C-alpha cells in the first residue's frame, strides 16, 4: 500500500512539474512573438527582476488594450513567467551582447 501511495504521489509530482515546463515554453513563445511584434524585447528585459507577476499582468493587460494578441489566460501565463524570471536567465535578453528578437535569429 505504501508503494502505491508513493507511486501515485511521484506520478502527480511529475505531471505538475511537466505542466510548469509546458507553461514556461508557451510563455516564452508568447513573449518572443507577441511582445516583439510591437517593440524590441529590451523593453521586456528592463522589467525583469523589478516587476512581480501582478505588475506584469497589468503590463500585459495594457498591451492587450493596445492590440496585443493575448487572451486572458495567456496574459496570466506570461505574467507568471516574467514575474519569476531573472534578467540573467532570460535567453531573449542577451545574445552576444545585443538585445534581439528571437524570431529573427
Image: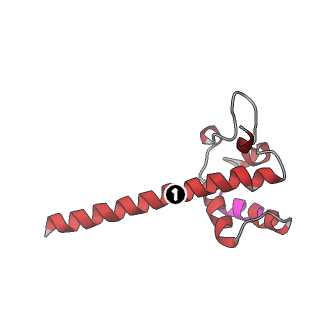
Q: Is residue 64 left or right of residue 88?
A: right
Camera sees residue 51: no
Residue placed most toward the observer, 15 or 88 = 15
| Residue that carries the numbered disc 1 in the rendered image | 22
Residue at screen point 66% across, 47% down: 49
Q: Is residue 56 magenta?
A: yes
- Residue 58 vertical placement versus 98 (above, below): below
Which SS type dominates the magenta stretch?
Answer: helix
Q: Residue furthest left?
A: 1
Res 65 quadrant in image: bottom right
x, y (%) of residue 44? 75, 48
- Residue 4 vertical placement versus 101 (above, below): below
Residue at screen point 68% across, 41% down: 92
Q: Is residue 90 left or right of residue 9?
A: right
x, y (%) of residue 56? 71, 59
Residue at screen point 22% across, 63% down: 6
Q: Residue furthest front?
A: 104
Give the quadrant of the C terminus.
Answer: top right
Camera sees residue 13: yes
Give the quadrant of the N terminus.
Answer: bottom left
Tell me, what colour scheme is on the image?
secondary structure
Describe the element under mark 1 as helix, strand or loop. helix
Residue at screen point 86% across, 65% down: 66
Res 90 quadrant in image: top right
x, y (%) of residue 18? 44, 58
Residues in magenta, as a range: 52-59
Amino acid at each position: 500500500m505504501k508503494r502505491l501511495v508513493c507511486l501515485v504521489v511521484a506520478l502527480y509530482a511529475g505531471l505538475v512539474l511537466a505542466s510548469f515546463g509546458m507553461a514556461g515554453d508557451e510563455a516564452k513563445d508568447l513573449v518572443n512573438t507577441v511582445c516583439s511584434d510591437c517593440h524590441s524585447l529590451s523593453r521586456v528585459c528592463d522589467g525583469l527582476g523589478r516587476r512581480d507577476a501582478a505588475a506584469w499582468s497589468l503590463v500585459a493587460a495594457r498591451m492587450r488594450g493596445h492590440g496585443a494578441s493575448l487572451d486572458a489566460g495567456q496574459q496570466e501565463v506570461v505574467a507568471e513567467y516574467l514575474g519569476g524570471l531573472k534578467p540573467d536567465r532570460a535567453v531573449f535578453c542577451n545574445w552576444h551582447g545585443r538585445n534581439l528578437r528571437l524570431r529573427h535569429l
